[in-house]
Image: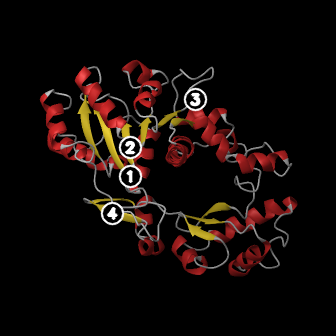
Amino acid sequence: MGPLDGVRIVELAGIGPAPLSAMLLADLGATVIRVDRKEPSGLGVSRPLQFDLVLRNRKSIRVDLKDPQGLELVRSLIDKADALIEGFRPGVTERLGLGPDTCLARNPKLVYGRVTGWGQDGPLAQAVGHDLNYIAITGALDAIGRDGQPPTMPLNVLGDYAGGSMYLALGILSGILHARASGKGQVVDAAIVDGVASLMTVLIGLRAAGMMNGERGTNLLDSGAPFYDVYTCADGKFVSIGPIESKFYRQLLERLGLEGAAPANHMDRAGWPEMRRLFAETFKTKTRAQWTALLEGSDVCFGPVLSQEEAFEHPHLKARKTFVEVAGVVQPAPAPRFSGTPPADPQPPAEANAENAAAAMADWFSQAEIEAFASAGAFE
């Protein structure tokens, strides 16, 4: 179940942002069938299936798209779909005979979702790239890091998944709403460079207003402000503080015993070096656990810096069931939450074997149609 119950999506198997976008939609109840290659592509990071968590909540079929029978099977699936997801280089699906013109001619209500790094057009559209390259040219990477240090790579969360997967999912859902109202489908061009630029909107506005400068690690939210930063504790572990508001800053000083010692006006940059020195010395006097006991849950804007394994056990996240265990593997629960249509518990990634393939297509075709496709060798 879930709010997207009844929505049908065909996912052409790929790597990076496309599978995560399909997972997000499947988590919320959409029926997603993944069309995989008969032979592994050799792309991506190989791992045992049960740990390839973005493949959860859907079944796969293996199809040779160069075989006319396999191609017709996939086209028949797309005929019944609300949306399609593909993450190939521009022009690949057209050469396969599954481009948007072909698919929309057969299914005019289809939302054809495409996610790439550079987008479907522009001078770099055909260039190879990865997350790091996409966030680099948008100005996002240059802004992340400490003063005097090279830019810091924020994993591939910012580009691939925030700028790519999330915007593709938003685009697909917006397209489906429009198609249901108008009867007309369309192509969604979700470029990671566009998504990351969109995510930077607030920061670009602050820069234009003169409230941020171009010097990395010297601003309010980029580690420049000593009251919005990470500090080392007595045990070598870390804590984070972020009392931007004056009243919260005053409470932090009270809890740290620094009233009268630390600068009273935390927005006065002249006092930042002394404030940083005092904070660094003070946080080294207790362990992370001791600071957590003193500060967590108060209005000082505090959080211990946890490892992934520690995060699984944090009382707040356990109370909210932010992480769940599926087939012995701990992983994030579907998000966001819905009061009326809560998503079902995640199902583990499924092998693309004959039994699962038939089960996957049961929501799309009659038993006779599945048997006909099987007899023709359309799927493995």
The disc, 2 or 3, on the residue closer to the chain's N-terminal end is 2
Mark 4 element type: loop
Count residues near mark 1 (Cα–Cα under 10 Å), then give few for <14, some for 14-19, many for 20+: many
| Residues at marks 4 and 1, CA–CA distance in whole angstroms | 13 Å
Mark in front: 2 vs 4: 2
Question: Residue 82 location, x and y as percent?
Answer: 42, 43
Q: Nearer the viewer, residue 111 or 316?
A: 111
Give the SS element for disc 1. Answer: loop
Q: Which mark is residue 345?
A: 4
**Label drawn at residue 54:** none
* Rendered residue at 54%/21% (across/down): 127
**Label 2 amino acid?**
Ile
Label 3 sits on residue: 118
Displayed quadrant of residue 16 = top left
Which percent across, then down, holds residue 118? 58, 29
Question: Which of the marked residues, 2 or 4, is nearer the chain's N terminus?
Answer: 2
Residue 30 - label? 1
Say which of 193 and 269 sits in front: 193
Q: Which residue is mark 2?
A: 9
Q: Looking at numbered disc 1 in the image, what kind of residue is underneath it?
A: Ala
| Contact check, label 1 and label 2, Cβ < 8 Å | yes
Q: Secondary structure at mark 2?
A: strand
Q: What is the C-alpha distance between the residues marked 2 and 4?
A: 19 Å
Distance, label 1 to label 2, CA atoms, is: 7 Å
**Amino acid beneath label 4:** Asp
